[in-house]
Amino acid sequence: MHLDRVVLDITAVSGPGKLLGNLLCALVGLLDGGDTAGAALLVAELNRLLELG
């Protein structure tokens, strides 16, 4: 069995009404060592997503 490396490039656009883009941008900000405002945005977007479901 041989597994090759997989690279996935995702481009997200944030803005009003762009739930997935806002969520991805907030997540990337957290992974890049963003501040607590990024974490608060991520939590808010996740809560909004859960309200839609």
Image (tube, rainbow, N blue to C red):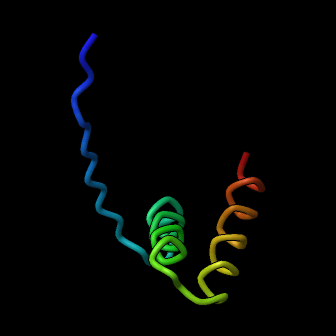
Q: Residue at x 35, y 65 (%)?
A: 12
Q: Position of residue 22 (x, y in %)?
A: 50, 70
Is 40 on the left or on the right of 34, as rendered?
right
Q: Position of residue 47 (x, y in %)?
A: 75, 63
Q: Residue at x 65, y 68 (%)?
A: 45
Dividing the picture into quadrants, the one containing residue 6 is top left
**Up-down: is 9 above or below 39?**
above
Q: Residue at x 53, y 67 (%)?
A: 27
Dividing the picture into quadrants, the one containing residue 40 is bottom right
**Up-down: is 4 above or below 42?**
above
Number of marks in the rendered image:
0
Dividing the picture into quadrants, the one containing residue 37 is bottom right
Is 50 on the left or on the right of 28, as rendered?
right
Q: Which residue is at the front of the view, 22 or 18? A: 22
* Quarter of the image where the C terminus is located: top right
Q: Which residue is at the front of the view, 12 or 19? A: 12
Q: Which residue is at the front of the view, 29 or 48? A: 29
* Quarter of the image where the N terminus is located: top left
**Up-down: is 27 above or below 9?**
below
Residue at the top extreme? 1
**Up-down: is 10 above or below 18?**
above
Q: Residue at x 48, y 77 (%)?
A: 29
